[in-house]
Every structure is written in C-alpha cells, then in structure tokens.
C-alpha cells in the first residue's frame, strides 16, 4: 500500500507511514493528501524539465564551455539535478494516478 501523502510503500498492516501520515484516516483526508501529491509531482516534473532545458542550452555552448570552463559545469550540474527531479515528479504523478484507480 502506497502512502497517499508521500508515496512510500507500506505494509498492509501498517497504521502510520514513516512520514507520519495516518494510513487509516478518513477518505477525504486521503483524497486531500493525494491531491497534494499530484501538485508536488507537477511542480517537480516542471522544475526538472526547466533544469534539463537549461542544461541542454548550456551544452549547446560546448565550445565556449571548453574554453572558459564555467558554463559546462553549470549545465552539467543542471542536468544532474534536473533529470532526477523530473523523474521523481513523473513517478509521483504515476503513483497518484494508480492509487486513484
């Protein structure tokens, strides 16, 4: 059973998630938590994609980056942060959709 608040997997016998959410809360509380998870997922996905696009634009200036040494590291850092952030946002959205079905 996935926690509707944080998406963590919990055993069916668990009363509370590690994040503190009451897994046996009334249905409207679970729906609110699921809605918050969807909102967080969209924010993470969007922020991750913006960072990936920033990284792509930065990598487009590879020649300048090799000469100056700065832009390449910034673009690489944006890619290293953006890709996992976008993946986590996508995973949150997928988990929320599966939980609502």
Image (cartoon, rainbow, N blue to C red):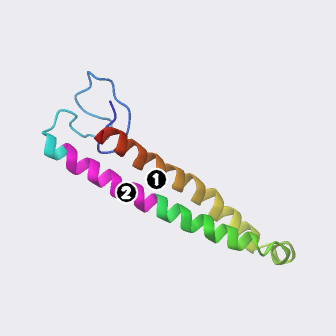
Q: Which residues are magenta?
A: 30-44
Point out the tag, 2 or 1, that comes first from the N-terminus: 2
**Cβ–Cβ under 8 Å for marks 2 and 1:** yes
Residue to which mark 1 is pinned: 89
Residue 88 position in % (x across, y down): 49, 49
- SS of the residue under disc 2: helix
Which disc number belongs to residue 51?
none
User: Who's the residue at 24% across and 40% down the image?
Assistant: 21
User: Who's the residue at 24% across and 32% down the image?
Assistant: 16
User: Who's the residue at 17% across and 32% down the image?
Assistant: 24
- SS of the residue under disc 1: helix
Q: Residues within 10 Å of mark 2 (few under 14, many from 20)?
A: some
The image shows residue 81, relative to residue 3, as above or below, that is below
Residue 25 position in % (x across, y down): 15, 37
Residue to which mark 2 is pinned: 40
Q: Is residue 39 magenta?
A: yes
Q: Is residue 40 magenta?
A: yes
Q: Nearer the viewer, residue 18 or 81?
A: 81
- Looking at the rendered image, the quarter that the C terminus falls into is top left
């Amino acid at each position: 059973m996935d926690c509707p608040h944080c998406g963590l997997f919990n055993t069916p016998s668990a009363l509370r998630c590690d994040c503190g959410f009451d897994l046996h809360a009334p249905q409207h509380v679970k729906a609110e938590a699921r809605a918050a998870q969807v909102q967080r997922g969209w924010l993470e996905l969007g922020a991750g994609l913006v960072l990936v696009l920033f990284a792509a634009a930065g990598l487009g200036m590879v020649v300048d980056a090799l000469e100056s040494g700065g832009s390449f590291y910034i673009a690489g850092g944006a890619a290293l942060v953006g890709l996992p952030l976008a993946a986590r946002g996508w995973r949150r959205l997928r988990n929320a959709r599966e939980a609502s079905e």
